């Protein structure tokens, strides 16, 4: 028996139940992993409240973690007992021990500790495809990051700044503004006090942005589109304030022949070779110091419901961990 957090029916944070469950031996192609740290992400909220559909009920939420291999199933050749590993996009992380498809795992460099790994795999690889593949950020680019003090936002800001972009970021408080400014954001907008579209126009002298990275969703749409120059790119990669409704494709034409996309990490790491390449690029950015992983909150696994309330209330900054 192992302890895990399970969801028996979708709903608010109260549906997260810390309980014992049986864990069978790892199947063919699987690894048994003992978690040392588990990442907390907004995608966990989406599965918990039913916005994203889990394969069935009950289920163990969570998509990111790090730990040590305890056993391997048949046909697993790349991983061995005692290996330090991490992963993202593998539903079932809110558990002391779990079985997971070995194809989702990557080996951890010795210089990256388990907590850093669990805090960065999903958020850091998301930032990687946003600045390297969705749009190749380069010197001279002007970008806007909505919720720049969040988990993805802080990593994204550092990476884009390191690549030479001018980074504008929205935040919800003065404390978050200081945090963003220390993490590569060149211009901070307090969205509760300022009209962010007007401020972007002021900051850019009316030229507006090449890219808007928007993980907020409903609360920033369609205003995010008004921050773009003609032929600019709007990247909607999250729904922290709720899912966008009534998206009108014609709006993109009316606002300057804009481009829009709604990407997900799973697509960008679906092939084993691209997963490894994405993770290695992230590891290099962290090991060289170009990107630092800010872990600002830790919670016991049994307190997952409290962690979800804090996350949804936007009381968190940077990365958060659940500790088994």
Image: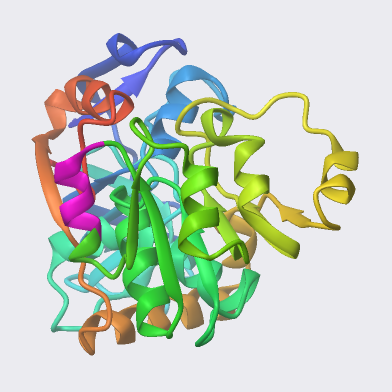
Quarter holding the N terminus is top left
Instruction: State which quadrant residue 175 falls in.
Output: top left
Residue plotted at (47% across, 18% down): 49
Magenta stretch contains residue 58: no
Magenta stretch contains residue 177: yes
Locate residue 148 relative to residue 67 in the image: left or right: right
Q: Is residue 26 above or below residue 86?
A: above
Residue plotted at (57% across, 81% down): 273
Locate residue 61 relative to residue 39 in the image: left or right: right
Give the percent coordinates (x, y) of residue 159: 37, 75
Locate residue 184 relative to residue 259 in the image: left or right: left
Quarter holding the C terminus is top left
Q: In this view, does 223 lie above or below 265?
A: above
Give the percent coordinates (x, y) of residue 243: 60, 28
Locate residue 204 relative to residue 21 in the image: left or right: right
249 or 289, nearer to the observer: 249
Instruction: State which quadrant residue 229 falls in.
Output: bottom right
Residue plotted at (15% across, 33% down): 301
Instruction: State which quadrant residue 305 falls in.
Output: top left
Please report the bounds of the magenta region as a residue range: 173-180
Give the percent coordinates (x, y) of residue 140: 53, 84
Q: Which is the main secondary structure of the residues drawn in magenta?
A: helix
**Whether residue 70 is visible:** no
**Whether residue 246 is visible:** yes
178 or 117, nearer to the observer: 178
Give the percent coordinates (x, y) of residue 101: 46, 57
292 or 99, nearer to the observer: 292
10 or 163, nearer to the observer: 163
């Amino acid at each position: 028996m192992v302890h895990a957090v399970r969801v028996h029916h979708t709903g608010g944070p109260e549906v997260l139940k810390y309980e014992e469950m049986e864990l069978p031996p790892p199947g063919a192609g699987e690894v048994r992993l003992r978690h040392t740290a588990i990442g907390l992400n907004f995608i966990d909220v989406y599965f918990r409240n039913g916005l994203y559909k889990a394969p069935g009920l009950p289920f163990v939420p969570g998509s990111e973690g790090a730990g040590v291999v305890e056993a391997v199933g048949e046909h697993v050749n790349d991983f061995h007992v005692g290996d330090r590993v991490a992963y993202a996009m593998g539903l079932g992380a809110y558990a002391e021990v779990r079985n997971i498809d070995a194809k989702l795992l990557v080996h951890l460099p010795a210089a990256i500790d388990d907590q850093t790994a669990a805090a960065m795999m999903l958020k850091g690889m998301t930032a990687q495809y946003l600045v390297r593949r969705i749009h190749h950020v380069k010197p001279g680019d002007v970008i806007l990051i909505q919720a720049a003090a969040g988990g993805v936002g802080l990593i994204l800001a550092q990476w884009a700044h390191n690549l030479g972009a001018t980074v504008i970021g929205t935040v919800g408080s003065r404390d978050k503004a200081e945090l963003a400014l220390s993490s590569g954001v060149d211009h901070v907008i307090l969205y509760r006090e300022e009209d962010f579209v007007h401020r972007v126009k002021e900051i850019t002298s009316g030229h507006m942005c090449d890219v808007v990275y928007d993980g907020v969703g409903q609360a920033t749409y369609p205003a995010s589109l008004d921050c773009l120059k003609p032929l600019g790119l709007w990247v909607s990669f999250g729904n922290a304030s709720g899912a966008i409704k009534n998206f009108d494709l014609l709006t993109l034409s009316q606002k300057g022949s804009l481009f829009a996309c709604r990407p997900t990490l799973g697509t960008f790491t679906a092939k084993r070779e691209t997963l490894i390449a994405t993770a290695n690029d992230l590891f290099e950015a962290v090991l060289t110091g170009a990107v630092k992983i800010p872990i600002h909150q830790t919670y016991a696994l049994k307190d997952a419901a409290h962690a979800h309330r804090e996350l949804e209330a936007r009381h968190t900054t940077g990365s958060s961990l659940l500790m088994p």
